[in-house]
Image (tube, rainbow, N blue to C red):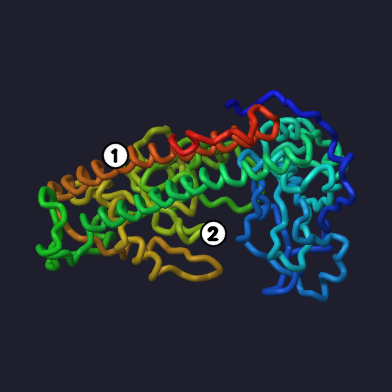
Amino acid sequence: MTDVANNEFAQLPLRRFIRDIVDGPFGSSLTSSHYSDEGARVIRLGNIGAAHFKDGDAAYIPLEYFKHLRQHEVSPGDLIIAGLGDANHPVGRACVAPAHLGLAIVKADCFRARLDEDRLSHRYTAWALSSSFVSSQVQTLTRGSTRARINLDVAREIQVPTPSLLEQRRIADFLDAETARIDRLSQLRRTQASKLEERYTTAISELTTPGITSADKRHPNWPWLPASTPTTRLGYLAQVQSGVTVHGARERSSDDAEFPYLRVANVQGERVDLSEIKTIVIPRAMARRSTLRAGDVVMTEANGNPDNLGRGAVWNGEIEGMVHQNHVFAIRADQEKLLPGYLSILLATVHGRRYFRFTSTQVGIATTSSSKVLDFPIPVLDLEQQRSVVNEYKNLWRSMERVRDALSRQLNLLAERRQALITAAVTGQFDVSTASGRGVESP
């Protein structure tokens, strides 16, 4: 199967089958201030999957306000189309409103359509609109520089393959069954990936957390830490450097220059992600105070996401002149006493995560300070023991990366096969009444 196929069925514009189509309320008619804990459901873009209604992320408006927005109402069985998309969520994808929905409306950039189901069924149309064949067509009709968008007029003109009603039912039944098989396997792979992360976190914690006794020893060839292992403040072994803070617009000066700029988003799971490095124009004097050196451990604040708090990685000096954001601390260790790699591992342990979570300042979002970083208690090992821990960690990391990469490849392959299966079915590339779907679960 190929992702973009020839079409064996007649193609007709959606408007030929539409009995009624509406979009959601725009502007001040529906904002987050209107939301409530219960009432009528608000269907948003995140609820529209590829021929699948995503029931999470539920939002509601009071029933009294629902009466004012009733022209945007959605009933169970209606076709819901996404008017906005991105690389991972194609514009024009569609699903059918579930039977349990209850009172509901669509939000802005979501369309509710009711077709002549004696000629074109909602269930089949959701699959067709979510296929690569139709999606590639819709992309040519979109506007928007960052996110693809269509309006109601464009939605009406989308060309849909239109087999007979009997064939539509066969295709929808086939895709319901076969994609469910693929989705079950994909969920299994995601569960395996999650368990892998848990196992990894436990393993590195066992390498470093004080209080492990000889009876708990898990790594006989590597150092383990008895309950008597002393701890000390990080401030006795390292200095903390704050990052660049820029307050709004300012006038340019002759001392200004452009510098590569390390942000919270670049510190990912004990590694520095260099795939998207932004730049910043600041005075050279400011840059000198916040320039990273090879061997610095960069540690993040929450910056809107509590999971970011205390995340750390070693900066190896890959890009010269890199400055760091004020939400990223640079910890410069005395390497005659503390190895940067050992410190970054400590930050990743349950021991490290708990410390920064429990000592964080809660003002809207969890955050920390340089004084809290300096007070971080760490187990004291000699340099040889630290190197052993780092080497063990590297072996664990390499093993995990191999398994993670394999799981990622399998998930990507399953996603490709799922999309190819949808496209081949709605374009008539094979007869679904005889197709078995064999091989879709063997990436």
Q: Quadrant of the C terminus?
A: top left
Describe the element under mark 1 as helix, strand or loop.
helix
Relative to 393, 221 lies left or right: left
124 sits to left or right of 89: right
Q: Residue 189 location, x and y as percent?
A: 42, 46
- Which of the 4 quarters of the picture holds residue 135? top right
Front residue of 54 and 353: 54
Alpha carbons under labels 2 and 1: distance apart = 30 Å
Q: Quadrant of residue 69?
A: bottom right
Q: Tell me the amino acid under the disc marked 2.
A: Gly
Q: Nearer the viewer, residue 228 or 195?
A: 195
Q: Earlier in the sequence, mark 2 or mark 1?
A: 2
Which residue is depicted at the point 12% across and 47% down?
A: 384
Q: Read off the residue under disc 1.
A: 398
| Neighbourhood count class around disc 1 (C-alpha, 10 Å): few under 14, some 14–19, many 20 upward | few
Residue shown at the point (71%, 43%) measured from the top left: 169
Disc 1 marks which amino acid? Arg
Q: Which residue is depicted at the point 56% across and 68% down? A: 364
Write down the residue under mark 2: 304
From the top left corner, tell me how far across and down residue 414 is, in percent. 50, 38
Q: State whether residue 392 appears in this view.
A: yes
Q: Is residue 422 above or below residue 383?
A: above
Graded by Cα atoms within 10 Å as few (under 14), some (14 to 19) or many (20 or more), the crowding at tag 2 reads: few
For residue 101, above or below residue 147: below
Q: Residue 72 appears at what percent x and percent y?
A: 84, 60
